[in-house]
Image: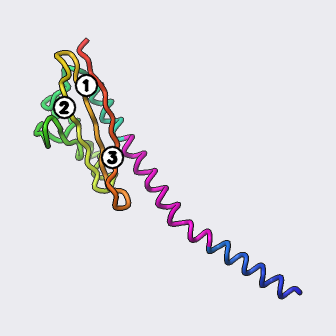
Amino acid sequence: MTLTETLYAVFITAVSAGVLMAAMPAATMAYTTASDQQHAMNLAQKELEAIRNAGFPNANATQLAAYGLIDSSTAVSTNTYSFSQVDSSAHDNVSSILQSGVGTVRIDSQSTNVTKVTVVVTWISHGTNQSYELTTLLANI
């Protein structure tokens, strides 16, 4: 009777260990996805807050490049500028934190006294393109 009970205990332990081991890859993938999303959100918020702190008069490519908030005043597309290498000395930039990470800032004038700023962080997570976007309005008051 003791041998049978021991065999059952070993079998149940082995099945339980197999179930736990099978769940580990999915748990690791979920953790890294959530971590990447958190990093992207933090980077986008940091960039947007820095632009908001610069103020409405400085919400243009020349000034943002001078403040080190975008990589250069050369647009990557219409009214859109890269900030992928910003803060590279502090290792707090999009390209070093996220896999294939790219950050862009789009500046659109809504009127003479209002500018719309959109920050987008894109990266690759487990072979899938991901993005996080924040938008704000700056007013000249």
Sequence-first disc among 3 and 1? 1
Task: Report if the CB atoms under discs 2 and 3 are less than 8 Å apart.
Answer: no
Give x and y (percent) for residue 85: 23, 46
Q: Residue at x 61, y 68 (%)?
A: 20
Is residue 89 toward the left or the right of residue 39 in the image? left
Is residue 132 toward the left or the right of residue 30 in the image? left
Splitting the image into 4 quarters, where does residue 55 fall?
Answer: top left
Select label 3 or label 1 by which is in front.
3
Q: Residue at x 25, y 30 (%)?
A: 117
The single residue placed furthest to the left in the displayed view is 74
Question: What's the residue type where badge 3 is placed?
Answer: Ser
Magenta run includes residue 21: yes
Sequence-first disc among 2 and 3? 2
Give x and y (percent) for residue 12: 73, 76
Q: Residue at x 64, y 73 (%)?
A: 17
Task: Report if the CB atoms under discs 1 and 2 are less than 8 Å apart.
Answer: yes
Is the residue 50 above or below the residue 96 in the image? above
Residue position marked by numbered label 2 in the rendering: 64
Image quarter hosting the N terminus: bottom right
Question: What's the residue type where badge 1 is placed?
Answer: Ala
Q: Alpha-carbon neighbours of circle 1 within 10 Å: few (<14), some, or many (≥20)?
A: some
Is the residue 120 above or below the residue 114 in the image? below
Select label 2 or label 3 by which is in front.
3
Question: In the drawing, what numbered circle is on residue 114?
Answer: none
Tell me where the magenta segment starts and ends, as one range: 19-42
Mark 1 and mark 2: Cα distance apart in space: 8 Å
Is residue 14 toward the left or the right of residue 21 in the image? right
